[in-house]
Amino acid sequence: MTDTTPALTATETTDPQLPGRRRTTFHTLSVAEVRRLTADAIEVTFEVPADLAGQYDYLPGQYVALRKELEDADGNLVELRRSYSICAVPTPGAIHVAIKRDIGGIFSTWANESLRAGDTMDVMSPTGGFISKHQMTGMNDPESINVETEDTFVAVAAGSGITPVMAIARTVLAANENVHFDLIYANKASMDVMFLEELADLKDRYPARFALHHVLSREQRISPLLSGRIDAEKLNKLLGAVIRTDQVDEWFLCGPFELVQLVRDNLAAQGVPAEKIRFELFTTGEPNRPEGNIGRPVIIDEADETYQIEFKLDGLQGEVKSPVNARETILNAALRVRPDVPFACAGGVCGTCRAKVVEGAVDMDENYALEPDEIEKGYVLTCQSRPTTERVLVDYDA
């Protein structure tokens, strides 16, 4: 994930033993190591104490939100929240994320220039649905791993979209010696490739089972197919000559909206079932999408017509009035009275602010995080939902 997003979405696990959609909480963790990946990207390792190990159990492909107070352009201290995918195989005691500097990104610039071992930061417990339907790690349920299947996985990633894919590829290749994994990885140039050495190591370790296809948009490669930007024509060739689409059991797509949508459209046209495709977005493609900061202030006049917004969180009831003319989201209103209301991206991408509408009705602007069955059950993204009835009750605990 990049400085302005997290992630995602895909299918969520329904197994109670696995950490799918669980209530997220922040804990202050220490930075154990900061490792330079490229000129504009670092890998940060957080130390997880033994008493919090259960809070930071995760599945490959999930992410954490980081919370930090930093100075904005005007010198004012503001709370920033940014989501980053976990890039390592699940292991107790540590959380590894990669942070790529984003142009104009306050948080990512600060992290790349100033973050050091020994610093502390608030780290949210892992969540997210960019996970495989195939059981691939014994950290949660060792007896359920099927090591006899001969599945084929394919990932298409761009830039820092490699971060969750690294965790997935490393885990699935180690878990099952019959698995094959293809990765199409797009970057501007070889100097921009994150985890270059780690990817080479995977290729050396699994030469017959891991295929790596670097596509560089601003650097000439021997094969024209692997040079230049991935467009519809190039993608058709890649998914025809290089990869047999009909033989793939599961797809992982991670990157900017345009690339992810291009691949999804291509696969749909080839008849690939939607349930085989996991995807995570950097951004929604909307330039005015809000970032993961504390909600905007709202002034209420006694003469204003208002909505009554009520919410349940951690077993406690909260309520707040929201002016009709303010067009305020449920999340923004709730944050005005409960700063611990869960959220990360505030852009309809990550799903952290998910809640169930118990009474009343809302309009949801964007949704890149909820599955159709969740929407049918009444779940919404509160960062994108505005009341359409006089009173609305949502349940974050549902």
Image (spheres, rainbow, N blue to C red):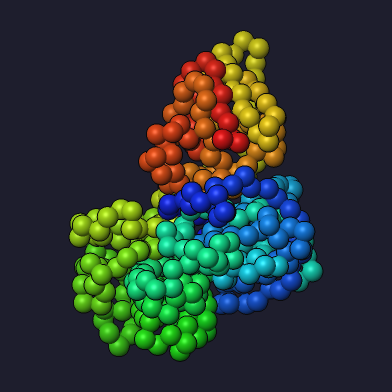
The answer to whether residue 271 is visible is: yes
Relative to 379, does residue 156 appear above or below in the rendering? below
Instruction: Residue at 66% x, 58% y: name it.
Output: 56
**Near-viewer residue (311 or 219):** 311
Quadrant of res 268? bottom left
Q: Extreme right residue here?
A: 118
Quadrant of res 64? bottom right
Q: Extreme front residue here?
A: 143
Quadrant of res 134? bottom left
**Near-viewer residue (73 or 295):** 295
Q: Position of residue 47 (x, y in %)?
A: 73, 67
**Near-viewer residue (363 or 316):** 316
**Near-viewer residue (111 or 120):** 120
Relative to 340, does residue 279 appear above or below in the rendering? below
Q: Quadrant of the C terminus?
A: top right
Q: Position of residue 315 (x, y in %)?
A: 68, 32
Q: Is residue 83 left or right of residue 130?
A: right
Q: Position of residue 55 (x, y in %)?
A: 68, 55
Q: Is residue 13 left or right of residue 260?
A: right
Instruction: Residue at 56% x, 41% y: name it.
Output: 353
Relative to 305, does residue 392 appear above or below in the rendering? below
Q: Position of residue 313 (x, y in %)?
A: 65, 34
Instruction: Residue at 38% x, 82% y: name it.
Output: 209
